[in-house]
């Protein structure tokens, strides 16, 4: 007979936080550089560590990162935290998010004190969470490039 409690306990011992290196670029700056309207040396880019949060739908940036990237707050969005609290948080201009050589562009929520990578980025980049090895891996069905599901 299977002992589900013992098996579950072992899984929890092996699981932990998944943190990844992420490159964040002000997408408006990049557009201006590409159009010759901004000097490439003025492109605002940050490389930092981020927590992969599979419980979060959107990516979250703390205010200090938003300020370093020179992002404007475009509006407000209601957000619900894991503990059930709700509050209105800032919504940024587009940010280019690069992880594991794959990139996407999205607006982000502004709150907290660390960068959180949510489901929309994971889905778009076709990356999966490997909890046992505490890392992200490309979808084995598409190991060389992301495939968008439509």
Image: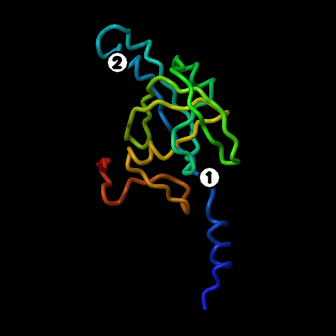
Foreground mark, 1 or 2, reads 2
Residue lying furthest bottom: 1
Where is residue 84 shown, x and y percent of the image?
69, 46
User: Which of the marked residues, 1 or 2, is nearer the chain's N terminus?
Assistant: 1
Q: Is 47 left, or right, of 89 in this rendering?
A: left
Mark 1 Cα within 10 Å, few/some/many (few <14, many 20+)?
few
Residue 147 in view: no
Q: Say above or below: 17 vs 62.
A: below
Q: Which structural element holds mark 1?
A: loop
Q: Which residue position holds label 2? A: 31
Q: Is 133 left, or right, of 4 in this rendering?
A: left
Q: Is 132 left, or right, of 122 in this rendering?
A: right
Q: Which residue position holds label 1? A: 17
Query: Residue at the location (44% across, 12% down)?
Result: 42
Q: Which structural element holds mark 2?
A: helix
Where is residue 27 shown, x and y percent of the image?
41, 23
Q: Quadrant of the N terminus?
A: bottom right
């Amino acid at each position: 007979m299977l002992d589900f409690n013992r098996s579950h306990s072992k899984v929890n011992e092996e699981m932990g936080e998944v943190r990844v290196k992420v490159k964040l670029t002000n997408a408006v700056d990049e557009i201006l550089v590409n159009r010759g309207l901004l000097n490439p040396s003025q492109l605002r880019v940050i490389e930092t560590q981020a927590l992969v949060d599979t419980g979060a739908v959107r990516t979250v940036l703390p205010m200090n990162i938003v300020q370093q990237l020179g992002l404007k707050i475009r509006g407000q969005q209601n957000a619900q935290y894991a503990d059930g609290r709700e509050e209105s948080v800032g919504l940024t201009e587009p940010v280019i998010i690069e992880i594991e050589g794959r990139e996407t562009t999205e607006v982000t929520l502004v709150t907290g004190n660390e960068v959180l990578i949510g489901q929309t980025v994971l889905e778009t980049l076709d990356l999966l969470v490997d909890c046992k090895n505490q890392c992200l891996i490309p979808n084995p069905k598409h190991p060389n490039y992301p495939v968008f599901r439509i």
